[in-house]
Image (tube, rainbow, N blue to C red):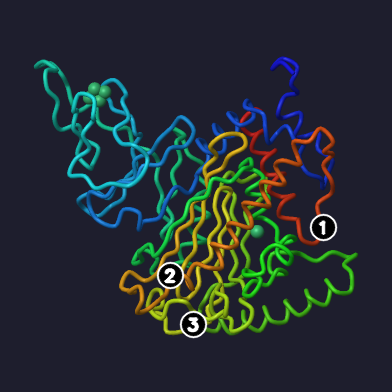
Amino acid sequence: MSEAQLKPLGELVRSREPGCGLPGEVFSRQDVFDTDVDIFFQKHWIVVGVTADVPEPGDVSVVDIGKASVIIVRDDDEGIRAYRNVCRHRGARLKEAGKSTVGMLVCPYHQWTYDLDGALRHTKYMGKDFDATCRNLLPVHLKVVGTHVFVCFADEPPADIATLEETMAPRFAPYGLQNTRIAFESEIVEDGNWKLVMENNRECYHCEAGHPELTMSFVAESTGSSADDMDEESSQALDAYNKLNADCQKDWESQGLLCTAVEALSGDVATHFRTQRLVIAGHGESQTMDTKVACQKLLGDSTRRDLGDTHMWTHNSWTHVMSDHAMISWIIPLTPEKTLVRTKWLVHADAVEGVDYDVKKLTEVWVATNAQDASLVAINHRGAQDPGYIPGPYSPITETYVDQFVDWYGARLKAHGV
Ligand code: FES
Ligand code: FE
């Protein structure tokens, strides 16, 4: 089909049957991908890192997103800053994607040299009338919440990041997440469109069959919802979960630990997020195979191991913070059918590998879960490209958040004139 014959994206999304998935072409078309990157990864706040990516002054982490690239740097005052990775001379990339440590940011082309505060400090042969002060690096909007580094490339970023910050900062505070280090990190390039990666993350319908490791600690009902027509088995499982949740919540709330669900998922909000302190099955401590903590040195100054799982979803990330470690994943779309999933496991900055924790025990649940999800996303993407694919209905019990994600996607396209 020529581009002229393709249905406009907005029309395609808005013609979806209520409660059903999106048509396959929104996952494969290059023009849709370009629009998605522009709207959802340039004009909305996205997670691109954690503070432990740049622990010391001069530490740099560069992240490429579509045609844009951002330099995250820890400055000499220990603050975190973000700049466009574009030299103010003739536009060369200052740094390649990845991490490094620098004294100053030196352009590899003609060596224009910038301080960590973005100021242009040295140039040669620019003449005596050259005004360096108007050639500083261009800042990118940045917000650190807990340990999450959010950036937004828009000139005027969505103001409702304030709601996320007000909600999450007190929930993350007891864990001292900026006093952490990366115990392990992984990168997977999944063979699927970014929306399918997120859809997969927004439901646990697939968990029972697909995630034997995760379901040791994860109570699937915790991110489902009730429906009038639930079958007996589902209804009993939900009742049991609700009782366990109520007991845990009462206990946590008596200690001042915030638990209740907060959702900002509707199409009216630009900054899409959800949080809740979720119960952990078994011993109730951590997302490990035996449901006990993997790191003996707990996060923050807590002495209590059964703090549940403070989760946070955004439109490009998912986070689980437990008493002993945090697991944070975020995505970057690479092409219509390839999505980078980055995951970091954080432990207390003073925790020592081999003494306080064992990396395998710390990571095995989510290493397995991420690999399983990558396979599921790949078969979903391939099948959804089949000419015979007709989107089917979401489960009203376990896929309501997928439906909401797709609704939000459509509403945000519309808000941006698509
Ligand atoms: Fe950077 Fe010339 S492009 S110094
Ligand atoms: Fe999964």
| Residue at x 63% of width, y 66% of height | 261
Say which amino acid is labelled 3.
Arg
| Disc nearest the viewer among 2 and 1 | 2
Q: Residue 242 placed where, x, y %? A: 73, 77
SS class of the residue under badge 1? loop
Q: Which residue is mark 2?
A: 359
Going from the N terminus, do you reach mark 2 or mark 1 first? 2
| Residue at x 72% of width, y 40% of height | 382
Going from the N terminus, do you reach mark 3 or mark 2 first? 3
Furthest residue in direction left, as rendered: 128
| Disc nearest the viewer among 3 and 2 | 2
Q: Nearer the viewer, residue 48 or 265?
A: 48
Going from the N terminus, do you reach mark 3 or mark 1 first? 3
| Residue at x 63% of width, y 48% of height | 197
Which quarter shows the N terminus? top right
Q: Nearer the viewer, residue 36 or 381?
A: 381
Q: Which residue is mark 3?
A: 305
Q: Which mark is residue 136?
A: none
SS class of the residue under badge 2? helix
Q: Which mark is residue 396?
A: 1
**Gap in angstroms between the C-alphas marked 3 and 1:** 34 Å
